[in-house]
Amino acid sequence: MRIKEACKKTGLTDKAIRLYIANRLINPAFTENYSGRKNYSFSDDDVDVLNKIALLRRYDFSVNDIREMLINKDNVLSILEKHLNNTKQNVEESSMVLANLTNAYDKSVSDVDELCIILNENLEPNNFEIMNFINSVWEKIKRKMPALLVICIVGFIVSILLLIAVTILLSKLFLLLD
């Protein structure tokens, strides 16, 4: 089927589908005309993938995360966990913003200066920055945990082997000195 039919079946726009093709989320068959324009031909499987992409985009998964999940199914759970944590944090921040806006509205502010004073009193940007930093560091640690564990184990083994080698060399040296 042509791109127009795929748009009708998925509810996606031509532009969105071309974006997903450009970002290698989907690879439909195509032919090129004399001017280099590509005419895509979508299979039913391609439409199924486009519907999955559309659903994941509705849940705010990034194009990169979707591509990673489509390519490497082993990463789905870790990407979901990261997305869940980010969404929880966004909800917490939005809840605080909503509470501060409601507070300002309840006080019937009369101008921008008064609104900014009230909002500034209740806003704690340092908490956002600290939590964002902690979350980003934790995500990096979790992603690199297997590598760090291997490095620690290898380092421990090398340390023991060096200790044994030094002990043997010292014992031979002491035997030679006697």
Image (cartoon, rainbow, N blue to C red):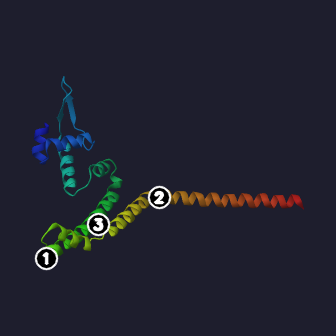
Q: Amino acid at mark 1?
A: Asp
Q: What mark, if any, has residue 106 been given in the picture? A: 1
- For mark 3, what is the residue? 89
Say which quarter of the image contains residue 170.
bottom right
Q: In the rendering, at what x and y percent does residue 116 appear?
A: 21, 68
Asked whether the beta carbons under mark 1 and mark 2 sit within 8 Å of each other, the answer is: no
Q: Which mark is first along the chain, 2 or 1?
A: 1
Q: Amino acid at mark 2?
A: Pro
Q: Amino acid at mark 3?
A: Gln
Asked whether the beta carbons under mark 2 and mark 3 sit within 8 Å of each other, the answer is: no
- For mark 2, what is the residue? 146
Q: In the rendering, at what x and y percent does residue 86 appear?
A: 30, 62
Q: Secondary structure at mark 3?
A: helix
Q: Secondary structure at mark 1?
A: helix
Q: In the rendering, at what x and y percent does residue 123 appear?
A: 27, 71
Cα separation between marks 1 and 2: 51 Å
Find the residue positioned furthest to the right. Answer: 178
* Neighbourhood count class around disc 1 (C-alpha, 10 Å): few under 14, some 14–19, many 20 upward: few
Q: Nearer the viewer, residue 53 or 60?
A: 60
Asked whether the beta carbons under mark 3 and mark 1 sit within 8 Å of each other, the answer is: no
100 w.r.t. 79: above or below: below
